[in-house]
Structure formats: structure tokens, C-alpha cells
């Protein structure tokens, strides 16, 4: 696949991961999802697949025909000033990696810390959308622009509905078991 197809696939997979994660975290939306989505690890599979596709997209761009430009991975532009569109895409990849990796540390982190780190997927998704619109190979196409705006708006609307639901219900944090020191 070409560089732009890997980026497009990564974006769509991460979009699906964000909306399934939001829906699965909402009691009101969760019960409306098909059982296959609720019990199959769909959110995790989509997250990892989107992260892998995005990493391949990034690496294909870094290891270009002109030679490896590893400086791009630490936000250094080989041609002078920092390319903000590129840097935002790399930052989005890193933040998505943190939001995904923290799932595997869920049992060792306090609930609010875990949720806050995992919730970084929302701004990372917005950054990925901005990256796609700013420097994406197909961003000039009206259909692509519409798709990026529609996916970002629908993910934001779903996240807002979830926040409103939390506000109405009240945030319930499960207390951790007390540790006895003897």
C-alpha cells in the first residue's frame, strides 16, 4: 500500500476505535451495540490495528527514497523550520500509543490517572484529523475533506454526549481496597 493509503486506513481504524470506545464506556449506548461488538474486544483490535497502520504510515514517510530522515520522529525538519502539519501527525501517533499502552497498565494505575491517560485518545484523534486535512495527500478532494470533518464532528458529538451523561449521572469512582501494613 502507498503512504497515503496507510495513513487513511490508520485514520479510519482509529476513528472506529474512538467511537466504539466511547460507546462501550456509556451504559446508555453500550446496551444498543450488538453483542459481537460488546464482547469481542473490537475496541482493542481497532485501536491496535489503527496504531499499526499509522506507525507504518509514519515509518514509510520517514524512510523515504531520499534516505532515512529519523529527525522527523523527534520533530526536527530536515529542510529548515518545523513542519507543523507533520509534527502534529507524529505527536498524534505518540499520544495514541500512550492511550493504547495504558490499557495494559490499568490494574496498576489509580482510576483517575488511567482514565485521564486513556482519554488522551480524543485530542490525539483531533490532531490526526488536523494532520490529515493540513498535509494529507487527498485532503484537497472535497469528499476527503467532508469525511475528515464528519468523522471529527461525530466523534466529538459522541464524546460530548458521554460527558453530559457523566455529568447527569455523576462520576462514580470505585474506591480501591485499603492496603494494610503490618
Image: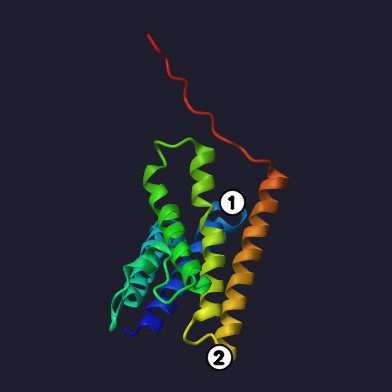
Image x and y of residue 146, in percent: 61, 83
Q: Which residue is mark 2?
A: 141
Q: Which residue is mark 1?
A: 27
Residue 28 position by quadrant = bottom right
Q: Name the residue at 52% across, 62% down.
A: 124
Q: Quadrant of the N terminus?
A: bottom left
In-image side of 122 versus 171 (left or right): left
Q: In screen coordinates, is 174 left or right of 158?
A: left
Mark 2 or 1: in front is 2
The mark tally for this picture is 2
Which one is nearer the viewer's eye here, 125 or 65? 65
Q: Position of residue 180 (x, y in %)?
A: 42, 14
C-alpha distance separating marks 2 and 1: 38 Å
Q: Residue furthest front?
A: 80
As helix, strand or loop, the secondary structure at mark 2 comes to loop
Query: Is disc 2 in contact with disc 1, using a CB cutoff of under 8 Å?
Result: no
Residue neighbourhood size for the residue with mark 2, other residues' Cα within 10 Å, grouped as few (<14), some (14–19), many (≥20): few
On the picture, is 177 further left or further right than 58?
A: right
Outermost residue on the top side: it is 182
Residue 156 horizontal side relative to residue 3, left or right: right
Q: Residue at x 49, y 81 (%)?
A: 136
Quarter holding residue 73: bottom left
Dot 1 crowding, Cα within 10 Å, few <14, some 14–19, many 20+: few
- Residue 49 visible in the shown view: no
Amino acid at each position: 500500500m502507498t503512504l497515503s493509503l496507510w495513513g487513511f486506513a490508520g485514520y479510519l481504524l482509529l476513528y472506529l476505535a474512538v467511537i466504539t470506545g466511547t460507546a462501550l464506556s456509556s451504559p446508555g449506548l453500550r446496551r444498543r451495540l450488538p453483542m459481537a461488538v460488546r464482547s469481542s474486544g473490537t475496541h482493542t483490535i481497532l485501536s491496535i490495528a489503527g496504531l499499526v497502520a499509522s506507525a507504518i504510515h509514519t515509518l514509510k514517510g520517514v524512510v523515504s527514497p531520499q534516505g532515512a530522515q529519523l529527525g522527523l520522529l523527534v520533530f526536527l525538519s530536515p529542510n529548515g523550520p518545523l513542519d507543523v502539519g507533520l509534527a502534529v501527525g507524529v505527536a498524534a501517533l505518540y499520544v495514541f500509543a500512550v492511550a493504547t499502552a495504558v490499557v495494559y497498565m490499568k490494574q496498576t494505575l489509580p482510576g483517575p490517572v488511567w482514565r485521564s491517560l486513556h482519554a488522551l485518545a480524543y485530542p490525539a484523534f483531533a490532531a490526526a484529523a488536523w494532520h490529515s486535512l493540513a498535509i494529507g495527500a487527498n485532503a484537497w478532494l472535497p469528499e476527503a475533506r467532508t469525511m475528515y470533518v464528519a468523522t471529527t464532528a461525530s466523534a466529538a458529538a459522541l464524546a460530548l454526549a458521554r460527558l453530559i451523561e457523566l455529568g447527569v449521572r455523576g462520576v462514580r469512582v470505585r474506591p480501591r481496597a485499603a492496603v494494610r501494613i503490618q
